[in-house]
Image (spheres, rainbow, N blue to C red):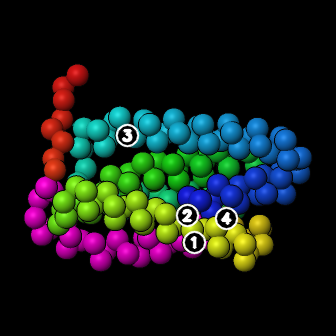
């Protein structure tokens, strides 16, 4: 939900805070999201691919990264601060996804886990769509921050899921 709200709120924030037209805001958003994707890819190749952190650490650091990134975006006043916020939030998402996937697959079969995660993503996007129809565009970035804070609050409750048993599907690291 938080990622969807951020993506929907970013164009209006860019236009309003940078005093640019919709075309320039769209171009800038494309550049910012591309930079965020590069940051996420770097984290995925450097940390998550080599399993350098536990699932719980990935989830906790990812949620903290999302909160920090959306906090920076909420207060951003220039292109550099928007870029920093997108980069931090993208790195947070790149860490959080394998973390919550690890938690989801510990007690369920892979098919059930995939269904649960797909349902959670669909509900998140649906909740974001509903929120967009009810909230002013200027409030979307602060709402994305609030949604990320809720995720951060739920992280301690997942600690026991990581202790119950080892993950049912382990990916063995390759040395290429």
Q: Where is residue 143? Give x, y as percent.
A: 63, 71
| Image quadrant in which you'd find residue 168 | bottom left
Q: Are marks 1 and 3 in contact (CB under 8 Å)?
A: no
User: Where in the figure is residue 14, as x and y percent of width and height?
Assistant: 78, 52
48 to the left or right of 6: left
Nearer to us: label 2 or label 4: 2
Specify the label residue 79 is tagged with. Answer: none
Please indicate whether residue 69 sits to the left or right of residue 29 in the image.
Answer: left
* Residue 19 in sight from this viewpoint: yes
Give me the C-alpha separation between circle 1 and circle 3: 27 Å
Label ID, residue 141? 4
Q: Is residue 56 visible?
A: no
Q: Residue at x 27, y 61 (%)?
A: 113
State how far apart marks 2 and 4 are (Cα). Answer: 15 Å
**Residue at mark 2:** 125
Is 131 covered by the magenta stretch?
Answer: no
What residue is shown with label 3? 44
The quarter of the picture where the C terminus appears is: top left
Contact (CB < 8 A) between labels 2 and 1?
yes
Separation of marks 2 and 1 at Cα, in angstroms: 5 Å
Residue at 83 percent across and 52 percent down: it is 15
Task: State the SS at label 2.
Answer: helix
Q: Earlier in the sequence, mark 2 or mark 3?
A: 3
Which residue is tagged 1? 127
**Lower position in the chain sequence, tag 2 or tag 4:** 2
Q: Is residue 150 magenta?
A: yes
Of the residues tagged 2 and 3, which is closer to the observer? 2
Q: In 3D space, how far apart are the residues under numbered discs 2 and 3 (Cα atoms)?
A: 23 Å
Q: Locate residue 144: give its quadrant.
A: bottom right
């Amino acid at each position: 939900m938080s990622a969807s709200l951020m993506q929907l709120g970013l164009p209006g924030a860019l236009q309003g805070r940078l005093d640019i037209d919709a075309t320039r805001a769209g171009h800038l958003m494309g550049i910012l999201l591309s930079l965020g994707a590069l940051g996420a890819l770097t984290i995925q190749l450097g940390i998550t691919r080599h399993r350098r952190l536990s699932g719980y650490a990935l989830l906790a650091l990812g949620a903290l990264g999302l909160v920090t990134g959306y906090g920076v975006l909420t207060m951003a006043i220039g292109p550099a601060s928007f870029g920093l916020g997108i980069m931090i939030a993208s790195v947070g998402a790149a860490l959080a996804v394998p973390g919550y996937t690890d938690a989801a697959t510990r007690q369920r079969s892979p098919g059930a886990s995939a269904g649960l995660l797909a349902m959670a993503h669909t509900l998140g996007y649906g909740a974001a769509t509903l929120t967009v129809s009810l909230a002013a565009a200027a409030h979307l970035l602060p709402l994305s921050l609030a949604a990320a804070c809720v995720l951060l609050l739920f992280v301690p409750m997942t600690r026991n899921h990581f202790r119950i048993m080892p993950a049912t599907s382990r990916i063995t690291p390759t040395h290429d």
